[in-house]
Image (cartoon, coloured by chain):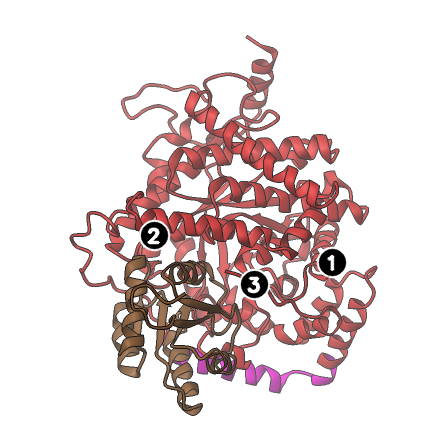
């Protein structure tokens, strides 16, 4: 017995245990961990963050949902909670994601289509009606206008008697990957980073249960990157946020433990598992060795995982259920903290209620029937898995070295430069095109698309349709709110935001909270800052 | 260089993302596919308006316009694009690519969209669709 094993045993014994039989279906009792040190819960956490793995607690089954009006999505939220979902995750429509109100000319045809439309606090109140905000944790996937959405959530909490300090959740707020992949930005990178650091400071001081950034590789991968590029760009962005916060004089042990990550789980099973394991190891090493974290919690790469939407096919869509199951299994074997499983109809439309339920059921099968949650890092020590983990790390380190050089010793500056010179978008587009060529040359088989196509002509399953009335209804709501509010108070609050934006030493969050409280719209708040920060237009390169 | 397959001048295609939708993986892949097939591709980028696309199509003397839509806005945005082209008296075929349910494909074609390419369309089909709409 090594001391490392004794340490693990002590940590394991101190860990909570779920009430479940940790044995095979044949009744064979299994150990909580197998293989060698460092064990799960031990630095650098390659084998997982917690000594008992999923024996303490299963991953959070967090299903991403949002469509139509706030009432529509509120009903879907309640449905998911009733069916055993344990956290909420909000999908906003395109205008909301871009800081535009439903009545903007840009929003025509987009209101409530790809997510829920939120214009003012009034919408946010309906979105979370009858949901106990001190009991659930809420994730909000929004970046450019993230500060407004966080402010509205704080204001809803106040109205429902839940103080901001008791609100739990995550706001994506990962602006760097917007310029690299998802493209939902408003301002140029540097002023956007100021908003991000303001939010980190604000939540660190006032919202101890809140994760102010979810550093996301998901969209980088969906845009076409390889697994190693997803890993490398995501962690590099993470290093950039750390450097930005350190430059502001913040304590790495304070904010470091509140950063979280979001990865894609794609279809190449072992590559994905290697990627997840490498992510934990790299993050721990860099936080400790390069950035000087001393609190172990600030070295832990906590992540959410979503199965790969881009891997789903419009052809024979029911096959997607099998793809999602395998990707969910990779996420579990990779040790994710929470998981969204995609619905099989997502290559055709937004998920129908039935498809979303099947997706949730799929991860429940992985969690409760397969037995993979009985043992922490069950694949650890397998030569191929360890080699793949090392290989993912090696490829990622090569990217870090490149960015470090681009930024003259600063990953933050390297990321800015890589955004400005098209490095990230170019790398991602190259990978996307290489993959497409391989599929077109039949070098890669996608079942139902370029092989085994019998049945592909079947009719589409029943799809979710957002009726045209949603847009008209939302416009009317917005008009009513604008009519009923105190317009002088709104104007004053917006002026205050513009004034605060001019002084980088002032935190923007308080004035934004004041503005949304008096029902300033999301776009009004965005414009109040745009006056100072300007806008970002991407150079169109193919 | 003349287009080797037809010996006529190169086909000129304007590609754009109309509106707020930022999903640009598909359209960038399509741009490279068409370029590799010998066409002249003018990619306008994200957040274009019907007016900016009309202006570019006119200026670039486009033979076809390709729009990519992933946010279920196609039934609003595609007719708006066609109307803007009509208004400018430009007779340029419009191809829509992206996520469009089967039922809506018919609607778009009836409305006057020249072709609709769904997810997973092979490169050869993409090239053929552009050639077909330009010839007819």
In the rendered image, which residue does mark 1 sit on?
A: A194
Residue A129: tell me if it is visible: no
Left or right of A226 in this view: A188: right
Nearer-N-terminus badge (1/2): 1
Chain B as rendered: colour = brown
Mark 2 neighbour density, 10 Å: few (under 14) some (14–19) many (20 or more): many
Q: Which is more N-terminal, label 3 or label 2? A: 3
Q: From the image, tell me which residue sits under label 2.
A: A312
Residue at the image point whose x is 72% and y is 45% from the top: A407
Q: What numbered label is drawn on residue A176? A: none
- Classify residue B95 by image quadrant: bottom left
Q: Which residue is mark 3?
A: A184
Q: Which residues are magenta?
A: A467-489
Q: Measured from the top left, where is residue A134 in percent x and y?
A: 58, 53
Q: Is residue A108 above or below residue A415?
A: below
Identify the residue at horizontal 37%, vertical 71% (top origin): B11
Of the pair B78 and B33, the residue shown nearer to us: B33
Q: Is residue B17 magenta?
A: no
> In whole angstroms, how far apart are the C-alphas of marks 3 and 1?
17 Å
Residues at discs 1 and 2 in contact (Cβ within 8 Å): no
Pinpoint residue B113: horizontal percent, then vertical percent. 32, 78
**Where the N terminus of chain A falls, by quadrant?**
top right
Q: Is residue B7 left or right of residue A153?
A: left
Graded by Cα atoms within 10 Å as few (under 14), some (14 to 19) or many (20 or more), the crowding at tag 1 reads: some
Asked if residue A482 lies in the magenta stretch, the reply is yes
Q: Residue furthest top?
A: A1
């Amino acid at each position: 017995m090594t001391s490392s094993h004794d340490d693990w045993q002590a940590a394991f014994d101190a860990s909570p245990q779920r009430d479940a039989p940790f044995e095979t279906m044949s009744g064979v009792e299994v150990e909580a961990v197998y293989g060698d040190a460092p064990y799960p819960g031990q630095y650098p956490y390659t084998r997982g963050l917690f000594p008992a793995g999923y024996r303490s607690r299963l991953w959070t089954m967090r299903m991403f949902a949002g469509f139509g009006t706030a009432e529509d999505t509120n009903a879907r939220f309640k449905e998911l909670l009733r069916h055993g979902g344990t956290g909420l995750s909000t999908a906003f429509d395109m205008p909301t994601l871009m800081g535009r109100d439903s009545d903007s000319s840009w929003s025509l045809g987009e209101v409530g289509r790809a997510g829920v439309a939120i214009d003012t606090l009034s919408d946010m109140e309906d979105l979370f009606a009858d949901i106990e905000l001190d009991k659930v944790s809420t994730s909000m996937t929004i970046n450019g206008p993230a500060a407004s959405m966080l402010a509205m959530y704080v204001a809803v909490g106040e109205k429902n008697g839940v103080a901001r300090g008791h609100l739990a959740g995550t706001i994506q707020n990962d602006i760097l990957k917007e310029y690299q992949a998802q493209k939902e930005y408003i301002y140029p990178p540097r002023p956007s980073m100021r908003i991000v650091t303001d939010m980190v400071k604000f939540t660190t001081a006032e919202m101890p249960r809140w994760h102010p950034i979810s550093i996301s590789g998901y969209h980088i991968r969906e845009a076409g990157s390889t697994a190693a590029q997803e890993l490398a760009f995501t962690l590099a962005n993470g290093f950039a946020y750390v450097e930005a916060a350190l430059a502001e004089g913040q304590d790495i042990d304070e904010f470091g433990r509140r950063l979280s990550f979001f990865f894609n789980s794609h279809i190449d099973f072992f590559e994905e598992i290697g990627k997840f394991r490498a992510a934990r190891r790299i993050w721990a090493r860099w936080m400790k060795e390069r950035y000087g974290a001393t609190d172990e919690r600030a070295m832990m790469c906590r992540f959410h995982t979503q199965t790969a939407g881009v891997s789903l096919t419009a052809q024979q869509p029911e096959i997607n259920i099998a793809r999602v199951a395998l990707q969910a299994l990779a996420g579990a074997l990779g040790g994710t903290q929470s998981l969204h499983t995609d619905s099989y109809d997502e290559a055709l439309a937004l998920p129908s209620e039935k498809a979303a339920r099947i997706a949730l059921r799929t991860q429940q099968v992985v969690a409760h029937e397969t037995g993979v949650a009985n043992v922490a890092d069950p694949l650890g020590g397998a030569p191929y898995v360890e080699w793949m983990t090392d290989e993912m790390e090696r490829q990622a380190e090569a990217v870090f070295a490149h960015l470090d050089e681009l930024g003259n010793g600063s990953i933050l500056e390297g990321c800015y430069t890589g955004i400005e010179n098209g490095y990230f978008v170019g790398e991602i587009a190259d990978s996307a095109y290489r993959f497409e060529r391989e599929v077109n040359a039949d070098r890669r088989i996608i079942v139902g698309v370029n092989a085994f196509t019998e049945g592909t002509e079947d009719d589409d399953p029943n799809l979710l349709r957002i009726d045209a009335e949603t847009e008209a209804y939302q416009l009317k709501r917005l008009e009513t709110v604008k009519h009923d509010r105190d317009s002088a108070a709104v104007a004053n609050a917006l002026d205050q935001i513009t004034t605060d934006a001019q002084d980088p030493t002032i935190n923007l969050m308080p004035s934004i909270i004041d503005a949304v409280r008096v029902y300033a719209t999301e776009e009004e708040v965005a414009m109040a800052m745009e006056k100072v920060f300007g806008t970002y237009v991407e150079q169109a390169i193919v | 260089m003349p287009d080797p397959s037809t010996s006529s001048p190169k086909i000129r295609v304007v590609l754009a993302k109309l509106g707020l939708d930022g999903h640009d993986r598909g359209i960038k892949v399509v741009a490279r596919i068409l370029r590799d097939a010998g066409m002249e591709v003018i990619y306008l980028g994200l957040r274009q308006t019907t007016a900016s696309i009309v202006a570019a199509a006119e200026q670039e003397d486009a033979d076809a316009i390709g729009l990519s839509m992933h946010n279920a806005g196609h039934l609003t945005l595609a007719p708006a694009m066609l109307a803007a082209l009509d208004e400018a008296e430009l007779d340029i075929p419009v191809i829509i690519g992206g996520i469009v349910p089967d039922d809506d494909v018919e609607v778009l074609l009836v409305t006057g969209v020249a072709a609709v390419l769904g997810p997973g369309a092979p490169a050869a089909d993409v090239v053929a669709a552009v050639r077909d709409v330009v010839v007819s």
